[in-house]
Image (cartoon, rainbow, N blue to C red):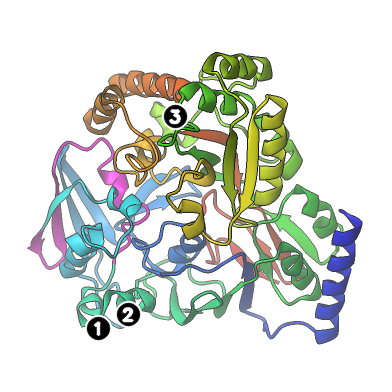
Amino acid sequence: MSTHHSIAFAALAAFFIATGPGDAQANDLIIAVQDVPDSLDPVTENSNVNLRMVYSLYETLVKTDYRDGGKLKPGLASEWTVIDGKTLEFKLREGVTFHNGDTLDAADVVASFAPVRRGLDENVPVESRQFFSGIDSVEIIDDMTVRIHMKANDAIALNRFASFPSHIISADAFNAAESYADFAAQAIGTGPYKLATYEVGNKVVFEAFDGYWGEPKAAADTVTFSAVGELSTRIAGLFSGQFDIITEIGADDFAQIEGNPLTAVAGASSENIRGLFYDSTNETLKDPRIRHALNLSIDRQLLADTFYAGKTVVTNGWQMPTFGDMYLADRPQPEYNVEKAKALLKEAGYKNQEIVYRVLNGYYTKQLETAQVLQSMWQEAGLNVKLEVKENWDQINEDTETRHIFDGSFTAYYPDPMGQFWRRFGPNGGRAGSHFIITPEMLALGEVLATSTDTSERRAVFAEMLDTFEADPNGAILHALAGFKGIRADRLSYDPIASEYMDLTTDSVKFK
């Protein structure tokens, strides 16, 4: 820790100690986060700050059990039948109540997957539209049975209803809302917590939902997510007792947190790859050899060791072991070869053109620090990369000539390449056309990946897609995303799931 950082931290710690602990009581939980979402409707916002909240508010027809190897289990649907590659039938669970008192029935499923919810209007960002764009119709068989028809054979049809953003909403709440924004701000679901307070940019407060049908129950009476942008302030608040849990800590914070007898570190790698996007629609990065050289210059293991003390891993390509039969275990990690990168740059005729890397400060763990190390790695290979620190994602995504490199994360929403690699780099990922061009050959391979039910064929196609992408990349793997958190070990224990979702039930949080 630098002298300047130490002085700043000491001053902040003194401030919190002087002002005393927060207002948390025995079963009230205060969590300091880097930000809170602009919307609490899962379909509207695809972000890690949204994901950590929706898990407590909403539920899906099928439940992904992260504590049992990601197995699919009954959720709001008590049973289901896969009729064929295009048709699924769900029998809804009896006696489920929404936070507004409505009772779950088939009309709620129709509302959840109707065009306005599938993103076929201006309310939903284009990157979220792909999740439901394959739905043709939702047929009501009776009040508690629905049949969902897909437009084409779908290799992962069932998985689509077990993860983000297929959370079920109240049809009555949706129809009664004066506007879409009003509906989204209400966050009425069936989860173990209900929304109490929502202040955009400041805080979100949950209350335990007494009418929750399932198990496990809410662990806390109330949960307050407080937006605290500076990590040093979050750490000081953890030490003073202001906060019970803080997010986005890195390896250089572990020693001081674990060295305090009242605090501890919790967390591990999640089903997500932390990486980069490249915009190849401009002249600067148009040549794939320059983008390939950028990738070859990254020492990923050094990043994992430096910022996560080796507690996260470098993945074997754009995939996770959770893919099961679709996981290509024999694929290597991304190559690190500075000399090969230099040769590619010379071959491409690179003349020290400035490459701009737009970055936020702290949205991801050690985000700016990671960018600075990457800049140094690229410089070693002869790449002239300039960092531009931005205030928000709108500035990051602004379409100008200097949109060359920016950060991203690549969640495996489904345990399949369709839920991670092709979701982000395919034609419906929200960036095709505007940030990069997908070749007809890659599109044809992606169509097979999306529709084939032959695992051997899909594995071969996926391998070919990864080989093609490696030579002409639109992004870079860094490492598996690790969501480490600091906790007040004197007040609680915290056992997180391997997901960006934040489990705040009694399975995860236990007060002392």
Whether residue 356 appears in this view of the structure is: yes
Q: Return the x and y of residue 365 as percentages of the image width and height.
A: 65, 52
Q: Earlier in the sequence, mark 3 or mark 1?
A: 1
Q: Residue at x 80, y 84 (%)?
A: 20
The part of the chain drawn in magenta is 139-168
Q: Quadrant of residue 202?
A: bottom right
The residue wearing badge 3 is 286
User: Marks 2 and 1: CB-CB under 8 Å?
Assistant: yes
Q: Quadrant of the C terminus?
A: bottom right
Whether residue 98 appears in this view of the structure is: no
The amino acid on which the numbered mark 2 sits, given as a three-letter code, is Asp
The amino acid on which the numbered mark 1 sits, given as a three-letter code, is Glu
Q: Residues within 10 Å of mark 2 (few under 14, many from 20)?
A: few
Q: Return the x and y of residue 199 as percentages of the image width and height.
A: 50, 80
Q: Return the x and y of residue 175 as percentages of the image width and height.
A: 19, 78
Label 2 element class: helix
The amino acid on which the numbered mark 3 sits, given as a three-letter code, is Lys
Q: Quadrant of residue 479?
A: top right
Q: Determine whether, in the image, residue 111 is placed left or right of residue 464.
A: left
Q: CA distance from mark 3 to mark 1?
A: 46 Å
Q: Residue at x 64, y 26 (%)?
A: 297
Can you tell which mark lies on residue 178?
1
Can you tell which mark lies on residue 182?
2
Please check the rendered image and state whether residue 145 is part of the magenta-colored stretch, yes or no: yes
Label 1 element class: loop
The one of 344 and 492 positioned closer to us in this rendering: 344
